[in-house]
């Protein structure tokens, strides 16, 4: 389980500006509907009372803020006692590109600061570089596109110019990403991901394979008639079920407000380890 989660985190880190994400707003990247102003996300430990699963003690809390253009401008995490754990502030240029990211410690002191610079060709982002607080180079991403504007290649470099990883993307006829080939420097960890979609364009399956063709894990998704994702199931390489995440409630805009994560062990249901509730504020 730990191995699967670690690989999943790596995948999230690398996806970055794949597809056409560089042209999406924060609302779109975070799968939000409507003009969201802020989100408060509270995670509770789940307990069983009188045969029912209920909220237990508060575990963590997160807050997200967006400007009127849909850019995420602040992210903060809080401990179970309500004290601040960390905060991140984001700044953008007039085109919606992130140009600065400042991180703060729990006491409000500056932790780190990154600045971003961009280079474009025919409206597509072809290079992104970022710098430390002292203006020294931290790293660089480069992008290549097909004639439809789909990002077909992403390469990440260290500050010394050495290649860290390369990702090759493939798409179907309507622009949905169907395959990713991920290559890491040294060749020790190469992966291939496949995606499947229903007739409405909703992603219904993600499968991650090693370079030798062996399955690492698979995710299946289910949607309601309105296109809202209501369930996500994760499976091990042997097809055994690891966990199911269900979106129980949605608001009038179509954003989920309650999520429950169930885990399995020896094919027997356990008490879900967490219940997540979101309070969403919108611009008028």
Image: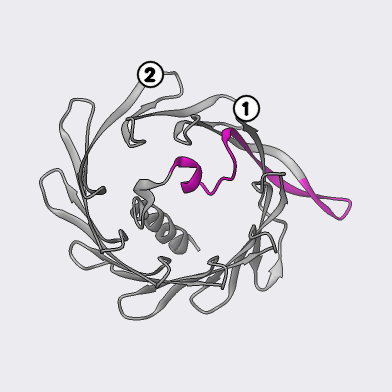
Q: Quadrant of residue 129?
A: top left
Q: State left or right for residue 100 relative to residue 128.
A: right
Q: Which mark is residue 177?
A: none
Which residue is drawn at the image coordinates 31% and 80% (left, top)?
A: 212
Q: Is residue 136 above or below residue 230?
A: above
Query: Is 27 one of the magenta-colored residues?
Result: yes
Give the quadrant of the C terminus: top right
Q: State left or right for residue 269 relative to residue 3.
A: right
Image position, residue 63 (x, y; %): 55, 32
Image position, residue 53 (x, y; %): 79, 52
Q: Is residue 125 above or below residue 58?
A: below
Q: Secondary structure at mark 1?
A: loop
Which residue is drawn at the image coordinates 41% and 25% (left, top)?
A: 105
Name of the residue lying farthest toward the right: 50
| Residue highlighted by disc 1 | 81
Q: Nearer the viewer, residue 124 or 50?
A: 124
| Residue highlighted by disc 2 | 109
Mark pair 1, 2: CA separation = 20 Å
Q: Quadrant of residue 80?
A: top right
Neighbour class for label 1 at 10 Å: few (<14), some, many (≥20)?
few
Segment colored magenta: 25-54
Q: Secondary structure at mark 2?
A: loop
Q: State left or right for residue 35 relative to residue 258.
A: left
Q: Is residue 162 above or below residue 27?
A: below
Image position, residue 167 (x, y; %): 27, 62
Neighbour class for label 2 at 10 Å: few (<14), some, many (≥20)?
few
Sequence-wise, the earlier of marks 1 and 2 is: 1
Q: Is residue 262 above or below residue 77?
A: below
Query: Is 120 one of the magenta-colored residues?
Result: no
Name the mark nearer the viewer: 1 or 2: 2
Image position, residue 47 (x, y; %): 76, 48
Which residue is drawn at the image coordinates 61% and 26% (left, top)?
A: 82
């Amino acid at each position: 389980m730990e191995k699967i989660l670690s690989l999943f985190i790596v995948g999230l880190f690398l996806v970055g500006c794949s597809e056409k994400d560089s042209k999406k707003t924060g609302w779109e990247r975070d799968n939000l509907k409507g003009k969201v102003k802020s989100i408060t996300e509270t995670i509770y430990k789940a307990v069983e009372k009188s045969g029912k699963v209920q909220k237990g003690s508060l575990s963590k809390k997160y807050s997200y803020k967006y400007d009127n253009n849909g850019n995420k401008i602040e992210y903060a995490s809080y401990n179970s006692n309500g004290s601040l754990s960390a905060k991140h502030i984001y700044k953008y240029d007039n085109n919606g590109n992130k140009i600065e990211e400042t991180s703060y410690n729990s006491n409000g002191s500056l932790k780190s600061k990154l600045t971003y610079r961009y280079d474009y060709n025919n409206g597509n982002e072809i290079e992104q570089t970022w710098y430390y607080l002292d203006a020294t180079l931290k790293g660089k991403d480069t992008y290549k596109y097909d004639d439809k504007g789909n990002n077909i290649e992403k390469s990440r470099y260290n500050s010394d110019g050495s290649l860290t990883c390369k990702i090759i993307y493939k798409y179907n006829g309507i622009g949905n990403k169907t395959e990713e080939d991920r290559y890491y420097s040294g060749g020790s960890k190469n992966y291939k991901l496949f995606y499947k979609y229903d007739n409405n364009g909703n992603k219904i399956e993600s499968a991650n394979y090693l370079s030798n063709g062996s399955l690492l894990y698979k995710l299946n998704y289910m949607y309601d008639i309105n296109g809202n994702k209501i369930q996500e199931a994760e499976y091990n390489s042997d097809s055994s079920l690891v966990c199911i995440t269900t979106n129980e409630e949605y608001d009038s805009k179509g954003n989920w407000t309650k999520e429950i994560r169930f885990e399995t062990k020896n094919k027997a249901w356990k008490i879900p380890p967490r219940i997540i509730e979101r309070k969403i504020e919108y611009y008028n």
